[in-house]
């Protein structure tokens, strides 16, 4: 099945610093979804990107889909302690596949 | 609106025992799926269904059975539990395959 690799696996930042996680594939993706999972919680949908080069923003979060539709990124500006959790990318190609996730910790 | 409801939230089994994890959704979603989550492994798809009466295998189907007799329910059965099945299990649904997934709160299973 289609595989997506997510990096980094862990990221520790000081509150106020920026954070970026990347999702990469060796094949062209039909779409990308991003989810956030708070510690002890369940994944919650953030956004879906479909178009080549698409950029979407949600407050301090910026999502990008690569021009070749083989990679995507999630960037958080000026992290807050409420941003802690694991961020997953996923893509659907027959079966919905998730990346391994990036665990974000924010130190106040 | 309850969304996706999973039961039980916690379960401890002995090796060889069987059990069923229940999943129900009230959003009339066609697509339902089961994932297991292990540290460092992300979410791995076990089985999925695109509608009542239709199921298919995911990435890690061995040791698990599913059925989809109604649109609302998608139970996951462990026929003979093994310690390797110790994990957190999530049920998820979406209006269509590839759509936004709505997850249940998870079921933490320990197999001794």
Image (cartoon, rainbow, N blue to C red):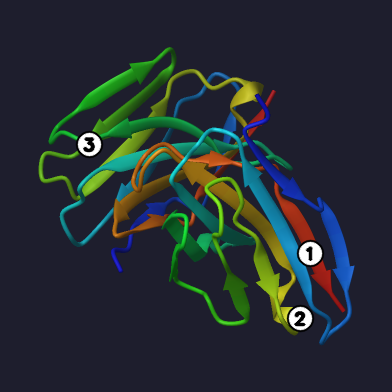
Note whether B71 is above or below B14 in the view shown: above
Q: Position of residue B87 (x, y in %)?
A: 71, 65
Other residues around mark 2 within 10 Å, as few (<14) / some (14–19) / many (≥20): many
Dot 2 and dot 1 residues touching (CB under 8 Å): yes
Helix, strand or loop under label 3: strand
Please state the chain letter of the residue tagged with numbered disc 2 in the rendered image: B
Residue A47 marker: none
Q: Work out whether residue A13 or residue B102 is closer to the camera in this orientation and state it.
A: B102
Dot 3 and dot 2 residues touching (CB under 8 Å): no
In the visual, does B7 lie left or right of B30?
right
Q: Dot 1 corresponds to which residue?
A: B109
Q: Dot 3 corresponds to which residue?
A: A65
The extreme top residue here reads A59
Helix, strand or loop under label 2: loop
Helix, strand or loop under label 1: strand
Q: Work out whether residue B80 or residue A81 is closer to the camera in this orientation and state it.
A: B80
Q: Which corner quadrant holds the C terminus of chain A?
A: top right
Task: Determine the CA span between mark 2 and mark 1.
Answer: 10 Å
In the visual, does B31 lie left or right of B90?
left
Q: Dot 2 corresponds to which residue?
A: B81
Q: Position of residue B88 (x, y in %)?
A: 70, 59
In the visual, does A48 lie left or right of A44?
left
Rendered image quadrant of residue A79:
top right
Dot placed on the residue nearer the N-terminal end, 2 or 1: 2
Please state the chain letter of the residue tagged with numbered disc 3 in the rendered image: A
Q: Position of residue B107 (x, y in %)?
A: 75, 54
Query: Is circle 2 on the same chain as circle 1?
Result: yes
Q: Work out whether residue A1 or residue B61 is closer to the camera in this orientation and state it.
A: B61
Task: Determine the CA span between mark 3 and mark 1.
Answer: 36 Å
């Amino acid at each position: 099945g289609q595989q997506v690799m997510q990096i980094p696996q862990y990221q520790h930042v000081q509150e106020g610093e920026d954070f970026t996680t990347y999702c990469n594939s060796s094949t062209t993706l039909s779409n990308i979804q991003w989810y956030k999972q708070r510690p002890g919680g369940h994944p919650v949908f953030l956004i879906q990107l479909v178009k080549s080069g698409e950029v979407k923003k949600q407050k301090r979060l910026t999502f990008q889909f690569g021009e070749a539709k083989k990679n995507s990124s999630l960037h958080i500006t000026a992290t807050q302690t409420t941003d802690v959790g694991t961020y997953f990318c996923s893509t659907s190609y027959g079966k919905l596949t998730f990346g391994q996730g990036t665990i974000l910790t924010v130190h106040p | 609106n309850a969304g996706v409801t999973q039961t039980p939230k916690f379960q401890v089994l002995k090796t060889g025992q069987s059990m069923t994890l229940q999943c129900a959704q009230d959003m009339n979603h066609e697509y339902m799926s089961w994932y297991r989550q292990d540290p460092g492994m992300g979410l791995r798809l076990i089985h999925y269904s695109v509608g009542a009466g239709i199921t298919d295998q995911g990435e890690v189907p061995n040791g698990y059975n599913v059925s989809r007799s109604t649109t609302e329910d998608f139970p996951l059965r462990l026929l003979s539990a093994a310690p390797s099945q110790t994990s957190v299990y999530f049920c998820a649904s979406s209006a269509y395959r590839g759509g936004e997934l709505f997850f249940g709160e998870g079921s933490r299973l320990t197999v001794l």
